[in-house]
Image (spheres, rainbow, N blue to C red):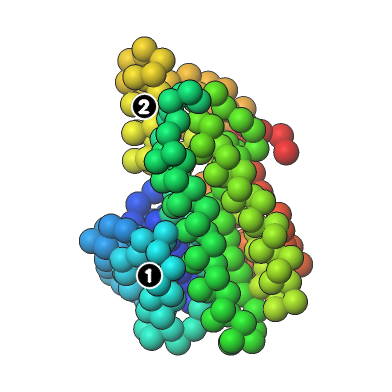
Amino acid sequence: MKLAGKVAIVTGGAQGMGRAISLRYAEEGAKVVVADLNREGADGVAQEITAQGGEAVGTGVDVRNAAQADAMVATAVERFGSVDILVNNAGVIKIIPFLETTEADWDFMFGVNCKGVLFCSQAAARRMIEQGRGGKIVNLASQAGRRGEALVLAYCASKACVISMTQSMALALADHRINVNGIAPGIVDTPLWVDVDKQFAKLLNMEVGEPKATFIKSIPLGRIEQPEDVTGAAVFLASADSDYITQQTLNVDGGSWPS
């Protein structure tokens, strides 16, 4: 098991990629703190893990709140004694035409997608530095952070910010042997994308399901990404196998974007 003896925190862990990563980390031997704004959902995933013989605890967190991020890390330390891995998976998206994007829309997406990465990473990194044995931070970006899209300006910008933050954090924490890397998924079959499809359908005058089907046709590997498709990279970047890798964001998108 690649993560035996490690303690991992996964934000946005109640569903989708966060749930899949939490379950996979537990399979690989990690003790997992499943953190989410939806505390009931986080507890449910933690119960799934314990029912399968793993160790996990759910906790509620609004990643936009620095005090709550600190409390999330404190939960990991109180329950399991340390923090070795942080996965910044919590994220939000709104599909909004450029000219209709409001300050509130911008602040919402940057609050969760970027400020959340900052606060959670600061809280975890402080503990990792205190422990003195390094650590791993994995940030969930997106292929949308590699390019602009007409109807997704604020989200694309926020995920480009995550890629840039990954680089800066990696440099800032390198002396402490804390590796910081990212994953850029593509179109993932999650509850989030059900809502995204509905938003695109409304704006493009399509039937619900049609935008999603159109996007899937553009994926070179010929199918939509499943949450479990991200977990291999998430384990690799959290394990000793990636000890000499930092500041990188790995595309896991079925070949949708070349670099």
* Residue 203 in view: yes
In the depicted view, which residue is nearer to us: 211 or 153? 153
Q: Residue at x 58, y 87 (%)?
A: 131
Pointer 2 residue: 199
- Where disc 2 sits, the SS reads helix
Give the number of the mark in front: 1 or 2. 1
In the depicted view, which residue is nearer to us: 123 or 32? 123
Q: Residue 191 appears at what percent x and percent y?
A: 34, 41
Residue 251: mark in rendering: none
Q: Residue at x 44, y 46 (%)?
A: 107
Q: Quadrant of the N terminus?
A: bottom right
Picture quadrant of residue 206: top left
Q: Residue 44 appears at what percent x and percent y?
A: 26, 62
Q: Quadrant of the C terminus?
A: top right
Q: Residue 61 appears at what percent x and percent y?
A: 35, 64
* Residue 30 in view: no
Relative height, residue 24 to residue 73 (above, below): above
Neighbor class of circle 2 (other Cα within 10 Å; few <14, some 14-19, many 20+) is some
Relative height, residue 66 to residue 191 (above, below): below
- Where disc 1 sits, the SS reads helix
Residue type pointed to by label 2: Gln
Marks 1 & 2, CB-CB < 8 Å contact: no
Question: Would you say 77 lies left or right of 14 here?
Answer: right
User: Gap in Å between the C-alphas at discs 1 and 2?
Assistant: 30 Å
Q: Residue at x 65, y 79 (%)?
A: 134
Pointer 1 residue: 68
Q: Residue 117 appears at what percent x and percent y?
A: 52, 59
Q: Residue furthest front?
A: 103
Residue type pointed to by label 1: Gln
Q: Residue at x 50, y 65 (%)?
A: 119
Picture quadrant of residue 136: bottom right
